[in-house]
Amino acid sequence: FPQTPSRLDRSYQAGFNQYKNMDAEQVQELRRKRTFRKFTFRGIELDQLLDLTNEELMDLISSRARRRMTRGLKRKPLALIKRLRQAKKEAAPGEKPRGIKTHLRDMIIVPEMIGSIIGIYNGKMFCGVEMRPEMIGMYLGEFAITYKPVRHGRPG
């Protein structure tokens, strides 16, 4: 039986047909022109976030994290940041740094940690998490779940 194309198939093909009429240079120009949205954290771009001092960063994060930072960074969080710096420095340009394991689930994510890979202990194993700009101001523990979610309705 010969199948007639559905409306969805025709609209899908129409999307490709617009590129058939263009030459290769125009397609390349379109791809180059497609820009990605710059990440901003509370109105500040990522490059500027990395230059902020701790006092300026404290104005941007939640009150609980701000209170914690006013009391100063203790020895263990500073040691973690130092190890993350070392791993980034050792990594080849364009490569991801090696993962750093930690038990510090209550560590607040600061802009300096972005791009690092951290193994966060959940009580049983280390969950590897890559730090992204959206995570600033959150705790490491939020990204390593400590329990296995209940699956209701399963026998046994």
Image (cartoon, rainbow, N blue to C red):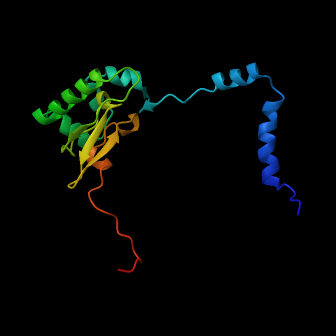
> Who is closer to the viewer here, 19 or 133?
19
Q: In the drawing, does residue 19 fall left or right of residue 4?
A: left
Residue 54 seen in render:
no
Asked if residue 156 is positioned above or below residue 14 in the image, the reply reads below
Q: Residue at x 20, y 41 (%)?
A: 102
Asked if residue 83 is positioned above or below residue 153 in the image, the reply reads above
Q: In the drawing, does residue 125 fall left or right of residue 51?
A: left
Q: Residue at x 75, y 22 (%)?
A: 24
Count of marks placed on residues:
0
Q: Position of residue 78 (x, y in %)?
A: 16, 30
- Identify the image quadrant of the C terminus: bottom left
> Who is closer to the viewer here, 142 or 129?
129
> Who is closer to the viewer here, 114 or 86?
86
Looking at the image, which residue sits at the far bottom? 155
Looking at the image, which residue sits at the far left? 75
> Who is closer to the viewer here, 20 or 57?
20
Q: Position of residue 57 (x, y in %)?
A: 29, 29
Residue 20 seen in render:
yes
Q: Residue at x 38, y 36 (%)?
A: 132
Q: Position of residue 120 (x, y in %)?
A: 25, 45
Q: In the drawing, does residue 89 fall left or right of residue 152?
A: left
Picture quadrant of residue 149: bottom left
Asked if residue 4 is positioned above or below residue 152 in the image, the reply reads above
Q: Residue at x 21, y 45 (%)?
A: 106
Picture quadrant of residue 87: top left
Q: Position of residue 108 (x, y in %)?
A: 25, 39
